Image (tube, grey):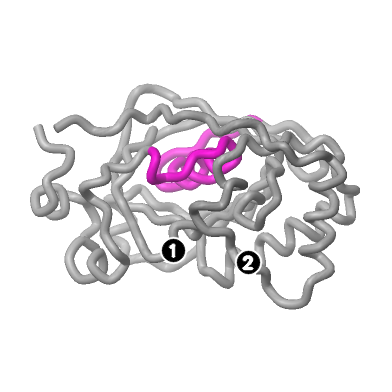
Amino acid sequence: MTHQPMTAVQGPATDYTRHQIKDAVRRLLDAEGIPPIVQAGHPVLRQLAAPFDGQVDDAELEAFINLMREVMHAAPGVGLAAPQLGVPLQVAVLEDKYELDPAAAAVRHRDPLEFMAVINPAYHPLGTETASFYEGCLSVNGYQAVVTRHRNVELKYATPAGTPVEEWFSGWQARIVQHETDHLRGTLYLDRAELRSLSSNAEHSARWSQPDIDEARQGLGFLCP
């Protein structure tokens, strides 16, 4: 059985106008409490988000990024893209500072990632090395699946201040970068997943939470030679 290719179909361009994007951001900022995370099946998760080009002003962008970070922490998660709040805009936040068993962290090459907000990100692989691990998504609540991703990537993005950046990421940080950037292209992790590995969170915790995927691969019959 062969694994799913790492290429995925890009979604259609969003049909939101600049005015609609601005209104969507303002509604979120004006609302009380933490907004819900959009779940799979909503069209906004399947659209190519609009590149940020000043649809909201600097103060609104800063407030929106702060709200995204708050939602990410509350979930909790290690990344959140604007479409997950119903806004088809190429903005994402990333942060991974959770404590992890050292043995698991070593196997997964999972190092802490300081908070960062990325505007109009795009990545490309560095080399051909890949890694396969379970991952989940805040917009596919309750499930996890194994995804094969590039182990090393270069990310090009702009900071909220508009400064262009080119940065290399490896290991789990590269996985987060790819996952969140994919959201902005209308791609969910399930599009790249080994679907035979799909597990509820409860089953994953009970059976497949080892640092690597060897037992899950044998038990569920995916990524077989």
Circle on res. 223: none
Task: Tell which of 150 and 50 is nearer to you.
Answer: 50
Q: Residues within 10 Å of mark 1 (few under 14, many from 20)?
A: some
Circle on res. 71: 2
Position of 126 with respect to 58 (left or right) is left
At 53% across and 33% down in the image, what residue appears? 168
Which residue was labeled with disc 1? Answer: 141
Let me know if residue 183 is in the magenta part. Answer: yes
Residue 85 at x, y = what percent?
Answer: 65, 57
Task: Tell which of 91 and 18 is nearer to you.
Answer: 18
At 35% across and 48% down in the image, what residue appears? 109
* Element on which disc 1 rests: loop
Task: Tell which of 22 and 122 is nearer to you.
Answer: 22
Q: Is residue 96 visible in the rendered structure shown here?
A: no
Q: Is residue 5 above or below residue 138?
A: above
* Element on which disc 2 rests: helix
At 27% across and 42% down in the image, what residue appears? 194
Q: Residues within 10 Å of mark 2 (few under 14, many from 20)?
A: many
Between the C-alphas of marks 2 and 1, the distance is 14 Å
Let me know if residue 155 is in the magenta part. Answer: no
Q: Which residues are magenta?
A: 166-191
Q: Amino acid at mark 1?
A: Asn
At 90% across and 48% down in the image, what residue appears? 57
Residue 211 at x, y = what percent?
Answer: 24, 57
Residue 165: image quadrant is top right
Magenta residues, dominant SS class: helix
Of all residues, the one furthest to the bottom in this rendering is 33
Q: Is residue 167 visible in the rendered structure shown here?
A: yes
